[in-house]
Image (tube, rainbow, N blue to C red):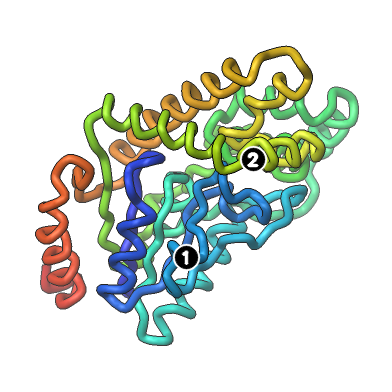
Amino acid sequence: MKKVLVIVGPTAVGKTALSIEFAKKFNGEIISGDSMQVYRKLNIGTAKATNEEQAGIPHYLLDCREIDENYSVADFQKEGREAIEDISNRGKLPIVVGGTGLYIQALLYDYQLGSQDETTETREYYEVLAEEIGNKKLWELLQQKDPLAAKAIHFNNKVKMIRALEIFDKTGRSILTPKEQPKKLYDYFLVGLETDRQLLYQRINQRVDNMLQEGILTEAELLYKTKNAQSVQGIGYKEFFPYFENKETLEQAVDKVKQNSRRYAKRQLTWFKNRLQASWWDLVQDSSSKLQLEQEVKKWLDTSEGER
């Protein structure tokens, strides 16, 4: 199996800097595993690496969608695997880095995300229902029945919502839950970054303050004008909408961004610790342990999976 280095963890824990450092050290190229960094013009609020920070390292799945386009787990799975093939075939190391756990899990394992077949009565029922109640109500129904699918499917994607509801009614399982244990597709080394919770929250708060100074309001206003696009849901943007409508002060909006970002970081950690086996490191408080991590990555690169 092809080797893939994966760096995960909550927001503001240092994933981007480590990925670029390791790409230089291990002849790697980087695949973004972030559901918001795919959007063009959303640079500050998504903490996208600048051209200077990228340091000439090729990056994939950045700026590959307009802000009014949808982007799904299936899109990431397909395009991420294509990037892994391309990078590996040129003798480079694919390095997947990001905090969107569902995307990374779907990339590394043979998850079948659902396929279309012949029209059924169940599908026809939901197609009629969608016309009657609208997309948002249909999404709320999906959330009640299959919260895992609702988390992955935007309410504007009616076709996928209907398919997920159909699968659930037919099988009693989520469209994202495989019939059998999914197969591991790559010989991957999963690095998890974490740090003390209060320290992480301080870093998140400071990052939000920095984003404000860098001009995140311009990006948020752009999304505010876009309205119903999937990208509008990104944390760090929608919280400013009440401010644009003169319903809240800027200070209140910023506090909400910080609060929602902290909550998201907590959910990210829970996801990765429950769903994927990672080697966890605190490089924020113990930067000297990076040398040991480098040695472990090198050992993994030098041995096949069968030898371990």
Mark 2 is on which residue type?
Ile
Q: In the rendered view, would you say 75 is above or below 22?
A: above
Name which residue type carries label 1. Answer: Glu
**Residue 277 appears in the figure:** yes
43 with respect to 206 (left or right):
right
Q: Counting residues from the N terminus, which is met first, the one under dot 2 or under dot 1?
A: 1
How many numbered circles does the render carry?
2
Q: Nearer the viewer, residue 180 or 241?
A: 241
User: Where residue 275 sits in the image (x, y, percent)?
Assistant: 34, 41
Reply above or below: 237 against 181. above
Q: Tell me how far mark 2 sits from mark 1, CA to CA.
A: 34 Å
- Quick one: quadrant of the C terminus? bottom left
Q: Residue 52 carries which label?
A: 1
Q: In this view, does 28 lie above or below 172?
A: below
The foreground one among 176 and 240 is 240
110 or 168: nearer the viewer: 110
Q: Quadrant of the N terminus?
A: bottom left
Q: Residue at x 75, y 41 (%)?
A: 222
Q: Quadrant of residue 219?
A: top right
Q: Residue at x 61, y 26 (%)?
A: 143
Residue drawn 34% across and 56% down? 17
Q: Please report the residue visible at 63 percent of the width from the left and 34 percent of the height from the top.
A: 237
Residue 110 x/y as whole percent: 44, 59
- Camera-near label (2 vs 1) is 1
Percent x, y of residue 272:
34, 41
Residue 13 in the image: state x and y as whole percent.
Answer: 33, 42
Callout 2: helix, strand or loop? loop
Kindly identify which residue carries mark 2.
153
Q: Is residue 33 left or right of residue 252?
A: left
* Res. 170 visible in picture: no
Q: In this view, does 9 lie to the left or right of 255?
A: left
